Amino acid sequence: MRDRRDEEVTAFVRARYGPLLRTAFLLCGDHGKAEDLVQATLAKTVAAWPRLQRSESIDHYVQRVLVNTFVTSRRRRSWWEQPFGRLVESRAPDEYAGVEQRDWLRRALDGLPARQRAAVVLRFYEDLSEQDTAHALGCSVGTVKSLSSRGLQTLRQRWVETDAAAEHEVRYA
């Protein structure tokens, strides 16, 4: 019986580790912290595995544990590094524009409050419905709508500010 359970857990971890790591990276913004977050999430999942086997929604449980662990860890400021400021970088050739945009988005996501960031990542990266996102965050659908809306509004505002700053650099460089 125990060997079968171990095989099921191993198969689940192998199947879900990559997607969980990508989601965790978007939440944390750091590969090492993302690995730690996934490890903590999977440890909690393994501990609850017998109870989860009777449930149909193991993936929902794991997403909720991932988000809750992330949000809780953000409350402990000492666990996260505090950036000193924005580094001045030169413009890259156009072939790297996609890489720069993804990097900019990752850094902009890092500046959002934890629950807004989680809502934006779950809704628009994981492509979860508002209902599934609410379930993962443990809140109402209306809260998901407001968190997503405020998060997207902040990201749009930062994008406009970044474009204005870049245009100013080009004009006066």
Image (cartoon, grey):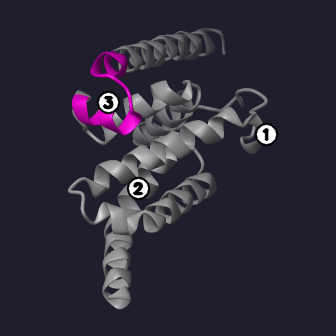
Q: Quadrant of residue 133?
A: top left
102 or 8: nearer the eye?
A: 8
Magenta stretch contains residue 139: yes
> Which residue occupies 55% across, 42% down?
70
Position of residue 51 measured from the top left corner of the image (x, y, whole percent): 35, 63
Judge whether 77 appears above or below 159 on screen: below
Asked which secondary structure carries label 1, the reply is helix
163 or 53: nearer the eye?
A: 53
Look at the image and tell me whether residue 124 can be seen.
no
Label disc, if present, on residue 134 of the rendered structure: 3
Position of residue 86 measured from the top left corner of the image (x, y, whole percent): 70, 27
- Say left or right for 118 vs 128: right
Q: Amino acid at mark 3?
A: Ala
Q: Earlier in the sequence, mark 3 or mark 1?
A: 1
Label disc, if present, on residue 20 of the rendered structure: 2
Magenta stretch contains residue 52: no
Position of residue 80 measured from the top left corner of the image (x, y, whole percent): 71, 41
Asked which secondary structure carries label 2, the reply is helix
Q: Which residues are magenta?
A: 131-145
Tell me whether the residue at label 2 lies in contact with that at label 3, contact meaning CB atoms closer than 8 angstroms: no
Q: Amino acid at mark 1?
A: Ser
Q: Residues within 10 Å of mark 2 (few under 14, many from 20)?
A: many
Residue bearing the label numbered 1: 78
Q: Main secondary structure of the magenta part?
A: helix
Judge whether 22 appears above or below 166 on screen: below
Q: Nearer the viewer, mark 2 or mark 3?
A: 3
Q: Residues within 10 Å of mark 3 (few under 14, many from 20)?
A: many
